[in-house]
Image (cartoon, helix red, strand yellow):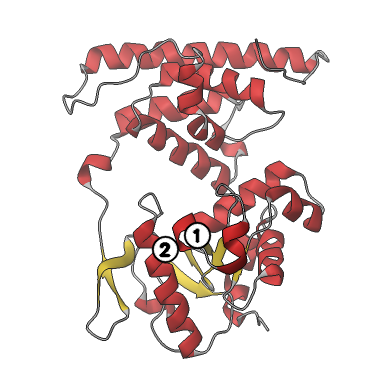
Amino acid sequence: MATLHWQMREILPVLCEGKRLDVLIDLILRANIRLRCYPGVRKIAKDIGATNTPTSDAKQWLEEHGAFVLVPYSKRVDEELKLPPKQHVYQLTGVIQLEGKSYQYLYMTPEALSAIQVVVADVLKTRTSMFQNLEVLKTGTEVDTSSFKDKSNSFASDDATDGTPSLSKSKRNKTDRVPAEKMTPMKDAIFAAFGHTSWDTLTDSERGVIQKSARELILAGFTPADVAGLYDYCAEQFDKFSPRALCTNASDARKEGYLDTPAASTSDEPATTSTAASDDDAARAAARERSRSRFSHMRQGASHDHTATA
């Protein structure tokens, strides 16, 4: 039987934003003895009385903050093997990481905590694209949050001598850091594409989603000039979507011809600053104009339904 940990009180204000707490509780209630479950987004949304979009947003936040890890097909067992390969299988960790500290949301014995640590470490080794911000305790049922440093903590790739995964501090590769002169234009383009008019009206979570999406697009070789096309492609596919959809559908948008710019070169040579700056300014202006036009039609009562083009 799962028992909620008292440390959840310390992060309740954040968990209560959107449907985060509702989704977490639903996953806990569905978890088996291995703390795994595999409901679809629609099923979770039905359980908590919400629509798919806020449910997906909450699920994404929980994953990014280490509440669970997605189990790859190669690590599934028993009934999980009968599921479609693309269906998500959630491995609850019992821990949420927030602002550099870890908080337990489930009480677990030292043995259970150690076992979960081994499983999660194994999953993280298998999933090369998994986030790096999760840290799990080795022993004890209570968390001393002062022992946790910043979000760069992650599972070490090597095992400790006692057979349990060791914890180490790893820093993001310097080549993955995006300078402000690139981040700002990309964030502005995403901001404008979604019809926002003031950053002050956005929550911390909304600003964080835009920033993460901007960074991911830049590292994948996309430019601010691509944002309007990415938005248009997503608008054709979905009734509602968040900035994260721009990233998860970027390759398809390019294949379907929604982007004006070719795929970026894999060369490490930096782009010419003056050319990039002028392109960024033009992209932001184009995104704002298309956004104003789009939302103007919405205010006039135009249909919000989108159908795929032939």
Q: Is residue 226 visible?
A: yes
In this view, the residue in front, 265 or 190, is 265
Look at label 1 and name its amino acid: Val
Residue 291 place in picture, x, y as percent? 61, 17
| Residue at image mark 2 | 123
Residue 293 place in picture, x, y as percent? 65, 11
| Residue at image mark 1 | 71
Look at label 2 and name its amino acid: Val
Q: Quadrant of residue 80?
A: bottom right
Q: Is residue 37 above or below residue 185?
A: below
Residue 109 place in picture, x, y as percent? 52, 89
In this view, the residue in front, 53 or 186, is 53
Residue 22 place in picture, x, y as percent? 72, 61
Q: Residue at x 73, y 55 (%)?
A: 44
Q: Which quadrant, please, contains the N terminus?
A: bottom right
Lateral position of residue 155 relative to residue 287, left or right: left
Q: Quadrant of residue 212?
A: top left
Q: Is residue 16 visible?
A: no
**Dot 1: element:** loop
Q: Residue at x 51, y 21 (%)?
A: 253
In this view, the residue in front, 261 or 78, is 78
The reply to whether dot 2 and dot 1 touch (C-beta < 8 Å) is yes
